[in-house]
Amino acid sequence: MNHYQHLWQDGSPGRFPTGKVVCIGRNYSDHAAELNNPVPDTPLLFIKPATAVVHLTQPIVIPKNRGEVHFETELAILIGQRLTSTTEENARNAIVGYGLGLDLTLRDLQSELKAQGHPWERAKAFDGACPLSPFVRAQALDAEHLHFSLDIDGKRRQSGDTSALLNPVLPLISYISEQFTLMPGDVVLTGTPKGVGPLHSGQRLTVRLQDVLCINTEIA
Ligand code: ZN
């Protein structure tokens, strides 16, 4: 049973249901390069279902005996309005919160699926595949200049800034909304910078967003 509910930074519950999580692959050129992937001409989108979402603040349970489980640290955007084929201006108004998410990936399985030309869902959409932090209210932050990082056992492993996104936040949300409607409570994950790698039981993770969010968690 998944008891996830969107939370604000002060611990109060968000009024939105838990929806789908729309993700983009290869949105930082340094990460595309580290996995020897070409940068696509159009945004490479995939979806994690609501059943994949768990609290990042809780110990993270990763699949066992299914090959490497990689972390990908990403800016998470909480959507507060229904968006269908929307403008960048409307996209900005629809963002209610910023947080951080881990796009957990069964990397060995994903490599197999990619080689076969199959969809990635089994590698990306499993239960628990999307730990999300509490959200900071959007008014305080600027979508185009958000810096975030991941430390594992005290060592910096990833750091990213939305100014380096190949598809910046507002055009990305506009594009997504042309493909499928975004609903209040949906989340957009904006892609990972370089530095991805395998997770192991007992690791301690610290994720930071600007100087407004700092979450300590661990791999169960
Ligand atoms: Zn990702």
Image (cartoon, rainbow, N blue to C red):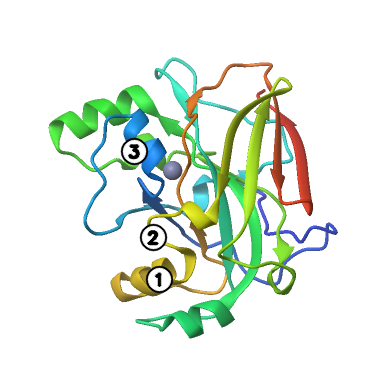
Q: Is residue 60 above or below residue 119?
A: above
Circle 2 sits on which residue? 167
Residue 112's image quarter? top left
Of 191 and 120, nearer the camera is 191
Query: Vertical placement of 174 versus 135: above or below?
Result: below
Q: CA distance from mark 2 to mark 3?
A: 13 Å
Disc 1 and disc 2 in contact, CB within 8 angstroms: yes
Amino acid at dot 3: Ala
Q: Nearer the viewer, residue 199 or 6?
A: 199
Separation of residues labelled 1 and 2 (CA atoms): 7 Å
| Front residue of 24 and 37 | 37
Locate residue 170, reporting x and y percent.
47, 71
Residue 126 in view: yes
- Give whichever of discs 2 and 3 has the lower sequence position: 3
Relative to 47, residue 215 above or below: above
Residue matched to label 1: 171
Circles 1 and 3: CB atoms closer than 8 Å: no
Nearest the eye: 100 or 80: 100
Q: Residue at x 67, y 19 (%)?
A: 203
Q: Residue at x 73, y 59 (%)?
A: 7
Asked whether residue 1 is in view, the answer is no
- Which element carries disc 3, helix, strand or loop? helix
Which residue: 26% across, 46% down? Answer: 39
Q: Which residue is mark 3?
A: 32
Where is residue 164 shown, x and y percent of the image? Answer: 47, 52
Circle 1: is it few (<14), some (14-19), or many (20+) Cα within 10 Å?
some
Quarter in which the C terminus is drawn = top right
In 3D space, how far apart are the residues under numbered discs 1 and 3 (Cα atoms)?
Answer: 20 Å
Task: State whether label 1 is within 8 Å of ligand 1.
Answer: no
Give the SS element for disc 1.
helix
